[in-house]
Image (spheres, helix red, strand yellow):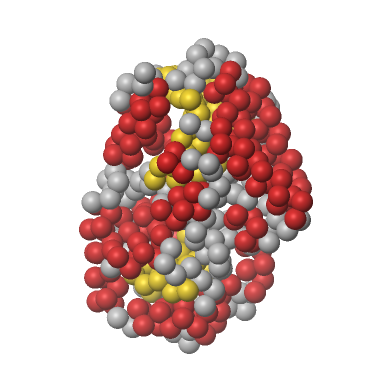
Amino acid sequence: MKIIVLTPHFAPDTAPTGTVITRIVTELAARGHELEVITALPWYRDHKIEKGFEGKLVRTEDTAWGRILRLHPFPTEDKRNIPKRALAFVGFSALAAAVGRKGARADIVLAVSPPLTLGVDGWLIARARGARFVFNIQDVYPDVAVELGVLSSPALIRSAHKLERFCYERSAAITVLSDDLRNNLAAKTSDPSKIHVIPNFVDTDAIQPAERENTYRRQFGLSGKRVVMYAGNVGLSQSLDMVIAAARKLAHHDDLAFVINGQGAARADLESTASDLNNVHFIDQQPIERLPELLAAADLHLVPLKKGLAASSVPSKTYSILAAGRPVIASVDPGTEIARLVEDSGAGVAVPAEDVSAFISALERLLSSPQELESMGNAGRTFVETWASPAAVAKAYEDLFQSLIAP
């Protein structure tokens, strides 16, 4: 098959979605398919184009399996500036549509959302090149933006929902990460049968349990500490103020360190709030190759989402934490995918989203029981070893694509 993949991030960009899509492309290439990737120039880490990629609107790279077209994403360093971010999405999407519609006939166009505008691109490119359009939903927009209060104008919300339905109706298939996301989308399309659950994978070969006392700990002054870690985007979707509240209440434990590893729109405010605390460490986003070491350095990981988001967003970091053999506290809406995953696997504890009291109580209980932490970490590792591998996920996409183009 000739497959076109339209994605906002791709290696060497470090965004989690980019890591997943890069591996899926690699696996599909290994299965003998020709691929064309249309993506942005690397920009995720610092929200500006990385050195060595500046100076061009479009860069073309030939590969053994096809080619990569890297386009200018028109990034803004201030993630809170919603009008600028919206203009950046529109600019990137317009460029992607113009570039992607040119070329030989293809079989499949796989477009990744967010941003939602790439759904329109996927449909336009598929029409121009005789392909079937498959829409991959990583997070459900505009629902996430509405829940966060980022999108509050009734007129804009109505327009965004119209765009969402436009993309769903024109897709030959829609892929989502969980049953929660499938249920969310089922009421928004006239044909729910086109929605397929294909989870993101975790590479259990690359991420394995390892020693806690490692170079990451030594580099950032964490040796000998009990480390509670949040690693990921420090953005508007995460209720990281709870982490600061917990650190403040548990500040009398000299051997306890709270780590917030990552960058994002909420970090400056969090650093200001925690400026009087010695037990909170803010660490910049690390290169992707350090992920196994970073995960291993923690005694306990955190997955905190604000209320209402767990039904429209599935943090892929959860699977990586489990692969590293570390326990997790998930502060998410009860009964949602991540809550069920953590509880069913025995890998940790789920507490209601933004419930500070329940969050701190769970922290205190688990930190007082090293044996329980160890047991939970082992249970999580066992669970993900039987979960979807990169090859299995790629096979699921391949089967779906072949069913769409079958005579």
Name the spot of residue 190 as percent of width and height, x first: 53, 41
Q: Nearer the viewer, residue 191 or 288?
A: 191
Q: Nearer the viewer, residue 97 or 49?
A: 97
Residue in the picture at 22% in, 58% down: 382
Name the spot of residue 97 as percent of width and height, x first: 64, 26
Q: Is residue 282 left or right of residue 56?
A: left
Residue in the picture at 62% in, 37% down: 166
Q: Is residue 304 left or right of residue 34?
A: right
Seen as rendered, the residue at the extreme front is 190
Is residue 211 in view? no
Residue in the picture at 61% in, 47% down: 46
Name the spot of residue 264 as percent of width and height, x first: 61, 56
Seen as rendered, the residue at the extreme top is 104
Residue in the picture at 67% in, 27% down: 95
Which picture quadrant has residue 48? top right
Which part of the image, by quadrant, shows the N terminus?
top left
Which part of the image, by quadrant, shows the C terminus?
top left
Q: Is residue 120 above or below residue 211?
A: above
Q: Is residue 263 above or below residue 167?
A: below
Which picture quadrant has residue 240? bottom right
Seen as rendered, the residue at the extreme bottom is 252
Q: How many marks?
A: 0
Is residue 303 in view? yes
Which picture quadrant has residue 326? bottom left
Q: Is residue 145 left or right of residue 259?
A: right
Q: Is residue 159 above or below residue 364?
A: above
Name the spot of residue 144 as percent of width and height, x first: 59, 56
